[in-house]
Image (tube, rainbow, N blue to C red):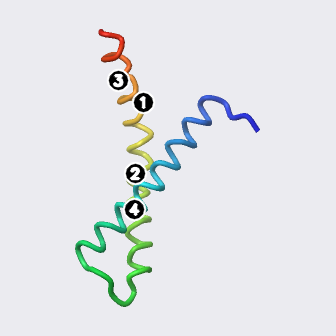
Amino acid sequence: MKLSRRAALRLEQFLISLAMSLFMSLALLIIRDGFFNGFFIAWLKAWGIAFMVALPVSIVVVPIIKRSVNKIDSGQ
């Protein structure tokens, strides 16, 4: 199956947001509270909130960053 360029970009943004929010919420919860009874449920809740923030941010920010890097790279 071949994805369109736009669909591939959206899938990339989705997967990056998923992975980053997963690992960041895990790390921050461990740093803040350590392991405790109910840790897994607390982590899933924190991850859900983090992902709901990360996905729209990546949809807005990733294209801006790519354009900025392209301008820097092309010398403009």
Amino acid tagged 2: Ala
Amino acid tagged 1: Pro
Q: Residues within 10 Å of mark 3 (few under 14, many from 20)?
A: few
Q: Residue at x 41, y 54 (%)?
A: 20
- Mark carried by residue 54: 2
Percent of width and height locating residue 14: 52, 48
Percent of width and height locating residue 72: 30, 17
For mark 3, what is the residue? 69
Q: Residues within 10 Å of mark 2 (few under 14, many from 20)?
A: many
Q: Residues within 10 Å of mark 1 (few under 14, many from 20)?
A: few
- The vertical placement of 37 against 39, above or below, is below
User: Which image quadrant: the N terminus?
Assistant: top right
How far, Cα to Cα, is label 1 from label 2?
14 Å
For mark 4, what is the residue? 23
Q: Residue at x 25, y 79 (%)?
A: 33
Amino acid tagged 4: Phe
How far, Cα to Cα, is label 2 from label 4?
12 Å
Percent of width and height locating residue 45: 41, 72
